[in-house]
Amino acid sequence: MPRQQQPAARPVRRRSYDQFCAAARALDSVGDRWTLLIVRELLAGPRRYTDLHADLPGVSTDVLASRLKDMEQSGLAVRRRLPPPAAASVYELTERGHGLLPVLAALAEWGAPALTERRPTDAVRAHWYALPLLRALDGLTHSGVVEVHLDEGEFHVRAGAGAGAGAGAGGAGGDVYGYGPADRPDARIRLAAELCPALGRGEVTFNEAVKDGRIEVTGEGPLAAELRGE
């Protein structure tokens, strides 16, 4: 008896608000749980799936895979294969994905008052403090890479010349922050993690925190000098 041919599987249609509104269309792409937090991770540069899963505590492997697939279909991210000897696949943001930087920065600013104290169940990663710190560094005359040292770890940010969280281009020309120490930083700063949200909220300025000793700045060159207030 001939085998009955199975009907071709239909592509699953993503959920939509079906509203002719720019905000609704945007939420069609990034309104699902975890999507914007994946963007937060990829703003620091290309990442392997396993690294994303490690830095997104609480997300299941199925949900993470589904969100990444949705982001590829929406043109927010792409997956590419690294050349040997790495032989691994990474996800990275497209130019459209990078354009979410000011959106995420504004959302972080809006949510900052809720960070009154860390709950026992709250996870933390050092690079999660990059967004408020970028806001505090916005408007610098000199540009360059600042290596940030917290007790929780290290990361680096690109500061000055429109590289901060308020940049309208969203850092499409390059990653606005990255994991770990920088190869050749223009300046290094050391501070307590709890100071970063206060800097982002404008409760204290970067210069004030340098003067009262809460931020230590080291390095040579014009950027380091400007951060020291020289």
Image (cartoon, grey):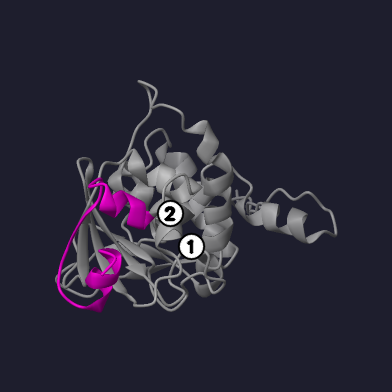
Q: Residue at x 47, y 56 (%)?
A: 39
Q: Which mark is residue 122?
A: none
Residue under label 2, please give it. Answer: 131
Which residue type does callout 2 highlight? Leu
Residue 54, image x, y percentages: 30, 42
Amino acid marked by disc 1: Ala
The image quarter in which residue 59 lies: top left
Decide if residue 220 is in sight here.
yes
Q: Is residue 215 magenta?
A: yes
Q: Which residue is mark 1?
A: 165
Is 27 situated above or below 165? above
- What's the residue at 66%, 51% (across, down)? 12
Image coordinates for residue 105, horizontal then vertical, percent: 52, 55
Q: Which residues are magenta?
A: 206-230
Disc 2 to disc 1, C-alpha distance = 6 Å
- Which corner quadrant holds the C terminus? bottom left
Decide if residue 10 is on the left or right side of residue 230: right
Q: Earlier in the sequence, mark 2 or mark 1?
A: 2
Residue 28 coordinates in the image, percent (x, y)? 69, 53
Residue 40 falls within the magenta-colored stretch: no
The residue closer to the viewer here, 96 or 198, is 198
Q: Is residue 209 above or below residue 194?
A: below
- Binning the other alpha carbons within 10 Å of mark 2 as few (below 14), some (14 to 19) or many (20 upward) gives many
Left or right: where does residue 6 sit relative to residue 210?
right
Residue, far top: 120
Callout 2 secondary element:
helix
Marks 2/1 in contact by CB < 8 Å: the verdict is yes
